Image (cartoon, rainbow, N blue to C red):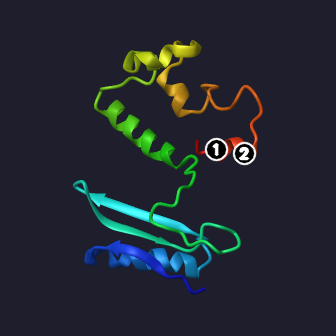
Amino acid sequence: MTVEIHGFYEPQFVKMKETFHQNFKDGLEVAASHSVTVNGGYVVDIWASHNDVAKTMLWEKDTILNVYSSTKVMSALCIHILVDRGLIDVDELVAKYWPEFTQNGKGNLPVKYLLIHTSGLAGWDTPITREDLYDNV
């Protein structure tokens, strides 16, 4: 599979760019982007492929996509660091650390419920359509 990698990377990250490219060759990616910052500055900002099934539109630097649950890992790591430092207790209510969280009847949820997916917060009260999901307005 021929895939052109767009963007830039600092020379010390050439291996990362090669691995990114190899993922396409191995069929592990269809379209993707990858950015890395160090001390607030970009050292890698690369992307490749198309953003439509018909392959008529190239993936661009600012292509929008849904990241779904990819932030869960980072959030959990951050919370565990805070627990390790004694700055947060998973048995305490979320509202102790985030008072605004109490809105809409969420005042009695402990932090641990957010970490183990038992908070009951996900979902919509009314069914949504595909058009609702892609409404950018």
Residue 79, relative to residue 72: is it above or below? above
Residue 125 placement (x, y as % from top left): 72, 25
Between 116 and 61, the one lying in front of the other is: 61
Residue extending farthest front: 137
Name the residue that disc number 1 marks: 135
Residue extending farthest bottom: 2
- Residue positioned 51% across, 61% down in the render: 63
Instruction: Say few, some or many: other residues with alpha carbon within 10 Å of mark 1 (under 14 / 14 to 19 / 20 or more).
Output: few
Three-letter amino acid code at the position of disc 1 = Asp
> Do residues under tags 1 and 2 come within 8 Å of each other at their CB atoms?
yes
Q: Quadrant of the C terminus?
A: top right
Residue 6, relative to residue 40: is it above or below? below
Secondary structure under tag 2 reads helix
Between 75 and 100, the one lying in front of the other is: 100
Q: Could you give the CA–CA distance between mark 1 and mark 2, rounded to whole angstroms?
A: 6 Å
Instruction: Say few, some or many: other residues with alpha carbon within 10 Å of mark 2 (under 14 / 14 to 19 / 20 or more).
Output: few
Residue extending farthest left: 39
Q: Is residue 118 visible to us here? A: yes
Three-letter amino acid code at the position of disc 2 = Glu
- Residue positioned 54% across, 82% down in the render: 3
Name the residue that disc number 2 marks: 131
Between 3 and 15, the one lying in front of the other is: 3
